Amino acid sequence: MPTISQKGASMPESPIRKLVPYAENAYKLGKTVYHLNIGQPDIKTPQLALDAVKIHSLDILAYTRSEGSEGYRKKIAHYYAKNDIHVSHDDIIVTTGGSEALLFAFGSIMDVDDEVIIPEPFYANYNGFSTASGVKVVPVISKIEDNFALPPIEEFEKLITSKTKAILICNPGNPTGYLYSKEEIKKLAAIVKKHDLFLIADEVYREFVYDGAKHYSILQEKELDDYAIVIDSVSKRYSMCGARIGCLVSKNKDVIKTALKFAQARLSPPTLAQIASEAALETPQSYFDDVIEEYQERRNVLIEELSKIEGVQVGTPKGAFYCIAQLPIKNSDAFAQWLLESFDINGETIMVAPAAGFYSSAGVGLNQIRIAYVLNTNSLKKAVHILKEALKVYKD
Amino acid sequence: MPTISQKGASMPESPIRKLVPYAENAYKLGKTVYHLNIGQPDIKTPQLALDAVKIHSLDILAYTRSEGSEGYRKKIAHYYAKNDIHVSHDDIIVTTGGSEALLFAFGSIMDVDDEVIIPEPFYANYNGFSTASGVKVVPVISKIEDNFALPPIEEFEKLITSKTKAILICNPGNPTGYLYSKEEIKKLAAIVKKHDLFLIADEVYREFVYDGAKHYSILQEKELDDYAIVIDSVSKRYSMCGARIGCLVSKNKDVIKTALKFAQARLSPPTLAQIASEAALETPQSYFDDVIEEYQERRNVLIEELSKIEGVQVGTPKGAFYCIAQLPIKNSDAFAQWLLESFDINGETIMVAPAAGFYSSAGVGLNQIRIAYVLNTNSLKKAVHILKEALKVYKD
């Protein structure tokens, strides 16, 4: 009998996968489970995006161009221009979600055993894409005490070897909610230029910044034209995760030319979803204003309630819709399972994402969880109350 | 300035990519171009699939499960059962096109530098997926004189090394149109079992078989339960290439478990396209009967007309909608370009796919082209007439 590959064996599982059977069992027992574990927003998709696929007049659902239709790419470039990011539609390749954009970026700039430095905790699937691409993640730890700010640039410098090809950041950060400042981006610009590395920024949460802060894209840093690769997606921006439309953006022509070959091999991004995504670009600012206000309110409630729990440490996210909370426990994997299996208040419990999966350093983040604030404020209050009461009785 | 990877540099370009600017120039000059080069059918998508996305009642375009929704997978299993292929929905992972299914299969069973044996000529993008996955294609030549039948099994045996992990076939074949017989599948079964290899079959053209022949799936071969991995797609079956929905099917639980980890890393296949694809499964048999009749008629016209041209050799495709034609020329790349650039009959010319890109052996297939019969019979007749007249005057 033939066997699977080492690559396949070392592909990481999703951090919450092990918990799914326990959640399903909790449902069976009639429990209500507040999901703090997922990045699927409860926010409605803009109606005009949903309507666009209802009024299509296609009679053949055909391929589009591998790089995405020119019309859509021009509209994306226009969207960026409104955000003070100046790129041509030829700098853009439409991808099947931000996931594929990241795979194309990794394939275009890294060979097997090459290294990418990533501040951790980071989006768990970066581990999966690295394994799939045969490249090595070199983590640099950002700390909850610093609110997950950029680690000192000397820490990056120490990790750079002849195998290092890129630094990858997520801005604003999943799972940290941290928003890098212009000064931090400039520090990163200096180091990638000094060492001839690419700077990849996953900016899918660009619109989700709070307290009047402003997002600064690596594409706004003129000196980075040859170095910057942006990963983007419609998933969170328009609450259309199921579209699976993202893009890769770079002013480096070699990167675009190379990524296009990966895109051609898979022929085309999904056509219906491109129709919805093109329409979504017409979403009025008022939609975002409402959404940002809602998330900011949720964040405020969440952080306020978490701060009241003894022994819980939490930063203040400035963006995205996640936070990392450090709990007075030893092992959040066991705790998360226990919450689903053995704890409830009047039949209600919570599901959280253990944070260890967001680190690639072994043994780090074991006492942390990621909370996604994709529930309304009432549910969030109830959920944090459950967490508080659970911590009172939990023994590990 | 940082540079792209060796992997990126060695990603192959699409065989027709170089011709696109010449085609665009021909349009600008007002020429009509008959496209014999593409696999995008002109057949209409079943209306019920197009309608399904028009009547959706989603208010959030959310992720589905990474392996595809259970409802859709159950219906796919039912479709297979009707085709005498007996699998459970748990043997199926829904993918973003057959392309992604192939990437998941390669990643799940092969490590860097591992080898996959493929009868050539083969679907050009197998080269791209192999490069992206870091694995090596080992070609075994099938011959136009044999109508591209399975090469003698000893030819495979000679190529098997400790690095060989799989044999990959496309059945019916793109670009050959060859349909493997039950006996040929049994020969392949014996060799993969003997050497503990996986047998991957790209069966996306399953429905397109002519002359009353019957497709025999590797999943019908009981002894292959641990060895067989099928790549499938809705793209051609329902003329919905732009959906980007396919699936990977295997009764080998380790393969499914491993492929699922790749699927989880990219979260979800496209949701709207799954809605359309699920509806497409209700397509009545009459749709296929009509389509098969149409393609068979086209094939008959194409082969008959091609056979009339002196010096042209062509097999008789038994399936799919492609054929390889061998021309009395030296270099079909140059010929294809010349057709677009320098030849026309009353302002009409043709675009063909040079066949070299369908081989991984260097220097093979240079005098061959692939013709996709995705045009109506009238257009096909005109197109072959243009080819005939062109060959009379072309000098290489």
Image (tube, coloured by chain):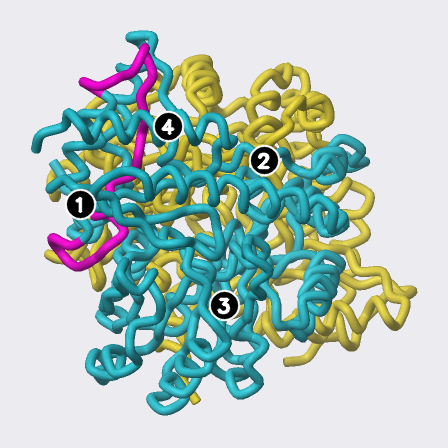
Chain colours: A cyan, B yellow
Disc 1 crowd, CA 10 A, few/some/many (<14, 14-19, 20+): some
Q: Are marks 3 and 1 in contact (CB under 8 Å)?
A: no
Res A165 seen here: yes
Residue B191 image point, x, y percent: 18, 40
Report helix, strand or loop for mark 3.
helix
Residue holding disc 4: A383
Residue B376 image point, x, y percent: 77, 40
The chain ID associated with circle 2 is A
Disc 4 crowd, CA 10 A, few/some/many (<14, 14-19, 20+): many
Query: Is disc 1 in the same subunit as disc 4?
Result: yes
- Calculate the distance from the C-alpha at mark 3 to the C-alpha at mark 2: 32 Å
Q: Are marks 1 and 4 in contact (CB under 8 Å)?
A: no
Residue at 55 percent across and 81 percent down: it is A221
Give the amino acid at mark 2. Answer: Ile
Q: In the image shown, does A340 or A235 lie closer to the viewer? A: A340
Q: Earlier in the sequence, mark 1 or mark 4?
A: 1
- Calculate the distance from the C-alpha at mark 3 to the C-alpha at mark 4: 43 Å
- Using the image, tell me which numbered label, if any, was put on residue A43: 2
Q: Are marks 4 and 2 in contact (CB under 8 Å)?
A: no
Give the amino acid at mark 1. Answer: Asn
- Calculate the distance from the C-alpha at mark 4 to the C-alpha at mark 2: 18 Å
Image quarter hosting the C terminus of chain B = bottom right
Q: In the image shown, does B185 or B21 lie closer to the viewer? A: B21
- Calculate the distance from the C-alpha at mark 1 to the C-alpha at mark 4: 19 Å
Q: Earlier in the sequence, mark 3 or mark 4?
A: 3
The correct choice, above or below, for A374 with respect to B305 in the image is: above
The chain ID associated with circle 4 is A
Report helix, strand or loop for mark 2.
loop
- Calculate the distance from the C-alpha at mark 2 to the C-alpha at mark 1: 30 Å
Residue holding disc 1: A367
Report helix, strand or loop for mark 1.
loop
